[in-house]
């Protein structure tokens, strides 16, 4: 996994796209889009995101 930030670190204002909790992980998709996840949802969806070649960034 390569970790390069495409924008500033996550802030308290960044929220999980699944549940609205504080975001801890940014998933940058090969298409250029991004998703934000709390720790719980990052663990739940991490394997599938890696299969899709998403870059996971810890915030």
Image (spheres, grey):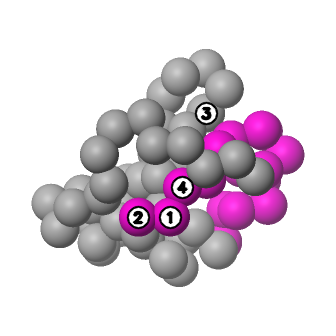
Magenta extent: 44-59
Secondary structure type for disc 3: loop
Dot 4: what SS? strand
Mark 4–mark 2 distance (CA, rounded to whole Å): 6 Å
Q: Are marks 2 and 1 in contact (CB under 8 Å)?
A: yes
Circles 1 and 4, Cβ within 8 Å, touching? The answer is yes
- Return the x and y of residue 44 as percentages of the image width and height: 66, 72
In the rendered view, would you say 11 is above or below 33? below
| Residue 57: image tag | 4
Looking at the rendered image, the disc whose residue lies closer to the viewer, 3 or 4, is 4
**Left or right of residue 22: residue 41:** right
Alpha carbon of mark 3 to alpha carbon of mark 2: how far? 16 Å
Residue in the picture at 35% in, 65% down: 23
**Label ID, residue 58:** 1
Quick check: 2 above or below 20? above
Secondary structure beneath label 1:
strand
How far apart are the two marked residues, 1 and 4, measured between alpha carbons? Answer: 4 Å
Q: Residue at x 61, y 33 (%)?
A: 29
* Residue 8 picture location, percent across and down: 29, 46
Element on which disc 2 rests: loop
User: Residue at label 2?
Assistant: 59
Whether residue 57 is situated above or below residue 8 in the rendered picture? below
């Amino acid at each position: 996994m390569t970790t390069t930030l495409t924008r500033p670190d996550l802030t308290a204002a960044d929220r999980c796209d699944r549940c609205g909790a504080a975001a801890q992980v940014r998933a940058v998709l090969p298409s250029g889009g991004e998703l934000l996840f709390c720790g719980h949802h990052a663990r739940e969806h991490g394997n599938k995101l890696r299969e899709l070649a998403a870059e996971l960034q810890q915030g």
